[in-house]
Image (tube, grey):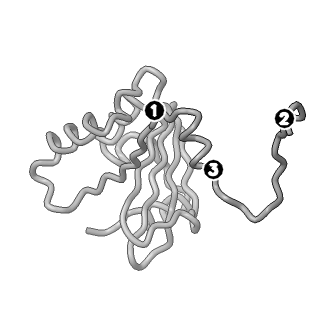
Amino acid sequence: ARSGTKSFMEAIEQGGDFSMIGQFGVGFYSAYLVADHVLVYSKNNDDETHLWESSAGGTFTVALAPDAGLTRGTRVVLHLKEDQLEYLEEKRVKDLVKKHSEFIGYEINLLVEKSTEKEVTDDEAEEEKPKTDEPSVEEVDEKKKT
């Protein structure tokens, strides 16, 4: 497979007349069913990273993206619509990828961040405070018996 971004950019520079639909295929535009803004980073081994960006509506931009952190491949970033936040759920995304990628012969990576919330008592919170070498102030009860 090869990235068509370089030839696409060359065609634009030569004054080509491009409409959004058809450049990536109709399936790609289904992203706008759940997202209001889409970013596509693309990089192959022999080319620089490019960023295709659009909020639909018939316009898009393509620009170099040297700080995208890609060594090779494609990264698609969807800015989800407020009513489509169910697609942030790991299980929902995994189920969709599994369902629609049965015959895809290359690896699909899903980057997942996990966090755990833990309730602690006030005593536990005090114990978890890091010890420092800095001086500290301690409250003293002045009515202490001697």
Q: CA distance from mark 2 to mark 3?
A: 30 Å
Looking at the rendered image, the disc whose residue lies closer to the viewer, 2 or 1, is 2
Query: Quarter of the image containing the C terminus?
Result: top right
Toward which corner of the image does residue 115 lie, by quadrant?
A: top left
Res 145 → quadrant? top right
Residue linked to disc 1: 80
Provide residue 87's location: percent of width, then percent of height. 35, 32
Q: Mark 3, residues whose alpha carbon is within 10 Å: few (<14), some, or many (≥20)? A: few
Q: Which mark is residue 5?
A: none
Which image quarter is the N terminus in?
bottom left
The secondary structure type at the circle numbered 3 is loop
Q: Nearer the viewer, residue 39 or 145?
A: 145
List x then y, in percent, for residue 19: 45, 42
**Does the residue at mark 2 contact the one at mark 1 (Cβ under 8 Å)?**
no
Q: Which mark is residue 129?
A: 3
List the residue tagged with mark 2: 145
